[in-house]
Amino acid sequence: MMEWAKKTLEKVELSRKERLHQPAPIPTETEAESILNNFHPDYSGKERTVAVGPNAGNQKFPLELADLLEADSFLPTSHTTVPDIETDVLILGGGGAGASAALALEGSGFNIHLATKLRLGDSNTVMAEGGIQAALAANDSPRRHFADAMVGGHGENETGLLRILCESGPKSINWLSQLGCLFDRNSDGTFRLRGGGGTSVSRILACRDYTGLEIMRVLKDAVRLSSTNILEEHIAVELFDDGNSTITGAVLYDRKSARLVNVSARAVILATGGSGQLRLQSFPTSNHVGATGDGLVMAYRQGCRLKFVDSYQYHPSGACYPEALAGQLVTEAVRSAGAQVVNSEGLHFINELAYRDVLAGAIIKEIREGRGVTTPNGKQGVWLDTPMIDLKNGEGTLANQFPGLIHRFESYKIDPVKTPILIYPTLHYQNGGIFIDSQCKTELQGLWASGEVTGGVHGKNRLMGNSLLDILVFGRRAAESVKEEIPERGPLTLTNLKEFKKNLPESLTKSPLFFPAASKINLDIGKLEIGTAKSDSSSLDNSATFEPPDPFAH
Ligand code: MEZ
């Protein structure tokens, strides 16, 4: 029990009955604008332009990302370019987008390699809880899905990409079901559909509160059974070009043998995911440990422009207490099932299904204005009144629909069925990324990209459940395009990298980051020679017992 919060919890309990049938208002457009401008982290001015690369001087980046874009490469320009592996298609990333691309290439006759930083499946995909959108209901349509996402994205979505996303929803669910994905169903066998923030009809399919895990389970099994060569613990370090800007492969770092591996490929699909582990402005994150924006850095050095990378999604309901869970996702589905967002005085100050950016800003506002709850360690949050779920929907609903939530909190003697959860926004999703066209082609020949590393489809605020759909749709689409347009094999050079380095300001730091500093995983890549295994002394710093990253570290 949270003894320290006794007084405020009493106020929450006292106001519960009155709140039961009284939804709080969604802010008007003017109120929302004021909340965003004054309280949302994207609008705090903690951003700057960079001096090098295709966006130099004309696009602002969060400070932490700008530093990485202007940092030096780990790879010396003298690095040898003799290939260790020759393949047709190299997929970088082992999450949902990379796995979907690999599966769509099966049967093409191409030789396929998929390289992943950790193990196949270790990705933000498995961290997604609440569901995936697809216009399947009788009263729904891809057009309606499109309209909802467009409004949610502040009208800034790339319309061509968004149309493809929404039109591909139903067949993506069909494909996943054929692979064995067990979506929740109604007693009549139809898919159980939930609502979410910004969905005008129920459109979200779920597997309880572990949807991403279930989706990745089937994708992973299928990839393992396919002809794809899986290179686990092979971290992408840099891309190769042919001397004429066409991408021709990548340099990987094999963690197990501590060797650099040159891969020559006719096509590269970048599916390296997001960058929540940059922990912008010291925010905790819901992202997996490898989400450090490596794909953005590598592609940028080659000349790919980045779009909207000043726009990140701070998921309103990240866990705030206990500190060991800080930043972990408390799915939006908990809010759509009836849990209300309540301040220290027991006031239901905003509708919990307001757009994510507005809700996150409103929570920060409440705290800054003194109506938040302070934990014994000085962290601040507001209440998510989870007991409301059973009150509204009947006893047992929360336990039945959100077993993952219960499991995590009961370890700390908090029962969300009886006690509200303290929440604070958590860095959840990179809204922007690499420019792609409708075939997932980047601005460089030979390089395709899909999933969270790309920018545009979600505009400046993604709706719940559209990222799980995105990775399936655009992972497979990239593969289809590769099948049609794969170039001939080109030479491996570091021409683009050398050009980029020429204009680089003096920099002591190196990038990509690969792992957050708090993980204590240090890769000493610059010192390695190609093909020379570093005896048994891996470059991992194993001197201390491994501690998971401190969720509040930066
Ligand atoms: O798409 C998401 O971000 C998602 C499903 C998150 C969640 O709240 O569960």
Image (cartoon, helix red, strand yellow):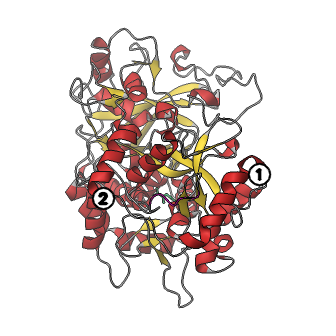
Compared with 542, 483 (above or below) is below
Q: Secondary structure at mark 1?
A: loop
Quadrant (top left, top right, bottom left, bottom right) of the C terminus: top right
Looking at the figure, which quarter contains the N terminus? bottom right
Q: Which residues are magenta?
A: 346-350
Q: Residue at x 68, y 56 (%)?
A: 9
Q: Residues within 10 Å of mark 1 (few under 14, many from 20)?
A: some
At 40% across and 36% down in the image, what residue appears? 295
Marker count (numbered): 2
Type of the residue with mark 2: Thr
Give percent across and percent down for residue 209: 59, 64
Q: Earlier in the sequence, mark 2 or mark 1?
A: 2
Q: Dot 2, crowdedness within 10 Å: few (<14), some or many (≥20)?
A: few
Horizontally, residue 97 falls left or right of residue 53, namely right
Q: Secondary structure at mark 2?
A: loop
Queried whether the magenta region covers residue 462, the answer comes back as no
**Which residue position holds label 2?**
28
Q: Mark yes or no: residue 516 visible.
A: yes
Question: What residue is shown with label 1?
Answer: 412
Residue 140 falls in image quadrant? bottom left
Q: Is residue 513 left or right of residue 61?
A: right
Q: Nearer the viewer, residue 363 or 228?
A: 363
Mark 2 in CB contact with mark 1 (< 8 angstroms): no
Q: Position of residue 305 (x, y in %)?
A: 25, 34
Main secondary structure found in the magenta portion? loop
In the image, what residue occupies the spot 71% across and 39% down? 376
Mark 2 → mark 1, Cα distance in angstroms: 38 Å
**Depth order, front residue of 149/81:** 149
Of the numbered discs in the image, which one, if any, rests on residue 554? none
Image location (x, y in percent) of residue 397:
64, 76
Question: Looking at the picture, which amino acid does disc 1 mark?
Answer: Tyr
